[in-house]
Image (cartoon, grey):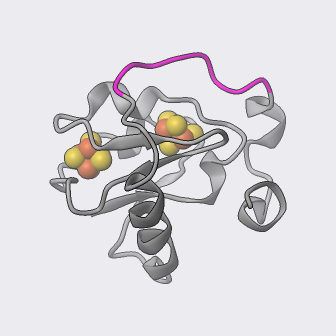
Amino acid sequence: TYVVTDNCIMCKYTDCVEVCPVDCFYEGENTLVIHPDECIDCGVCEPECPADAIRPDTEPDMDQWVEFNRKYSEIWPVITQKKDPLPTATEMDGVEGKLGKYFS
Ligand code: SF4
Ligand code: F3S
């Protein structure tokens, strides 16, 4: 599966949702997640993210992100259409450790 990771938080560009063939992105206030059981591993969303926040779970240390994506995809509503990025997107793109500071 692919997962949304830290750098989506406070950016939420949403380019990713337009290309997903199975509509498996879910939207929270500050970030999106992918449902790990619905993602078909096509990979087309990965290069679409301006914040480079989407990663394959085959990369190291992705377990916590798979769990994060699973947890919130079961709570949040699906998102299938692009919308404006968050007003903080530019300033927050690339900031380290956003999960601990800006998501609770
Ligand atoms: Fe959707 Fe494909 Fe991205 Fe999975 S890898 S979230 S199926 S676009
Ligand atoms: Fe987030 Fe990137 Fe999508 S910032 S909303 S994963 S395009």
Q: Residue at x 78, y 23 (%)?
A: 87
Which contiguous range is marked in magenta?
Answer: 80-87
Q: Is residue 73 left or right of residue 44?
A: right
**Foreground of the two, 23 or 42:** 23
Is residue 39 magenta-colored? no
Q: Quadrant of residue 77?
A: top left
> Residue 48 at x, y = what percent?
41, 34
Where is residue 40? Give x, y as percent: 15, 54
Q: At which x and y percent is residue 74? A: 37, 56
In this view of the protein, which residue sits in the foreground, 9 or 45? 9
Residue 81 lies within the magenta run: yes
| Count of marks overlaid on the render | 0
Q: Nearer the viewer, residue 77 or 68?
A: 77
**47 left or right of 40 in image:** right
State whether residue 66 is above or below residue 80.
below
Residue at coordinates 28% horizontally, 29% vertically from top-left? 19
Residue displayed at 45% across by 65% down: 71
